[in-house]
Amino acid sequence: DQQVKQNSPSLSVQEGRISILNCDYTNSMFDYFLWYKKYPAEGPTFLISISSIKDKNEDGRFTVFLNKSAKHLSLHIVPSQPGDSAVYFCAADDLTGTASKLTFGTGTRLQVTL
Amino acid sequence: KAGVTQTPRYLIKTRGQQVTLSCSPISGHRSVSWYQQTPGQGLQFLFEYFSETQRNKGNFPGRFSGRQFSNSRSEMNVSTLELGDSALYLCASNYQGVGTEAFFGQGTRLTVV
């Protein structure tokens, strides 16, 4: 049962353009969401997070949008740079407890071309 | 400020053996979580520790266990290794647990032969 889904396994974007990565979730208990960037054989690097009381959070070139009614979030990267090429994971957590237990999507491989 | 440190980076073990992996969290972080990444199952939660207590556990067999020490360092143990345990094991630390960002180490690549 995949509770967090990233339906696009890969995405190719030209340098300077906008990259939009999408994520859907099914568990209505999820109320905290994070995006991570990952290179092979390395740990994920935290990018940006959003809690369900917000619908948008921005940090530099990264913006995350949350649509709770649709159970959908997206990560926008503007402008895209070649160094952004990596696998991006969205993750979700449930704030009702105290222990962190992230549920990850399957990842989207982003390639930024020159 | 030092990041999350995992040792060793690489391990090769034989089926039936046991293995212990180590994780030192970011200074001041009291929550440590462990995840397994495999090509087939993706990133899956193993367990979370806070102040030496396991607060949450994922759907893994009892062969997977962990502990946390008073300095917040954590170890993960896998007994009676199986080929399917070959994976990248990742440790994450965050300040207090849920609702705060989790920062990951570089992982330990375990190969079971």
Image (cartoon, helix red, strand yellow):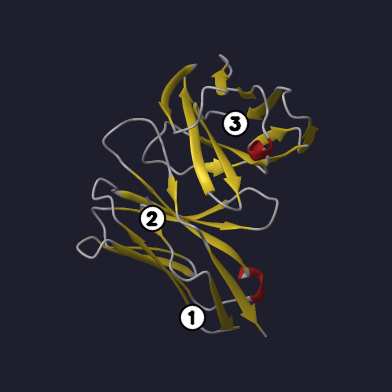
Judged left or right of residue B11, residue B89 is left
Residue behind mark 3? B25
Identity, as a three-letter code, of the amino acid under mark 2: Val
Mark 1 and mark 2 lie on one chain; the one further toward the N terminus is 2
Inter-mark Cα distance, 3 to 2:
26 Å
Query: Residue B68 is drawn in which quadrant?
Result: top right
Inter-mark Cα distance, 3 to 1:
35 Å
Mark 3 neighbour density, 10 Å: few (under 14) some (14–19) many (20 or more)? many
Q: Which mark is residue A60?
A: none
Query: Residue B100 is drawn in which quadrant?
Result: top left
Of A21 and A83, nearer the camera is A21
Element under label 1?
loop
The residue shown at (65%, 82%) is A113
Element under label 2?
strand
Identity, as a three-letter code, of the amino acid under mark 1: Ile
In this picture, is B91 found above or below A71?
above
Q: Measured from the top left, where is residue B21 in percent x and y?
A: 68, 27
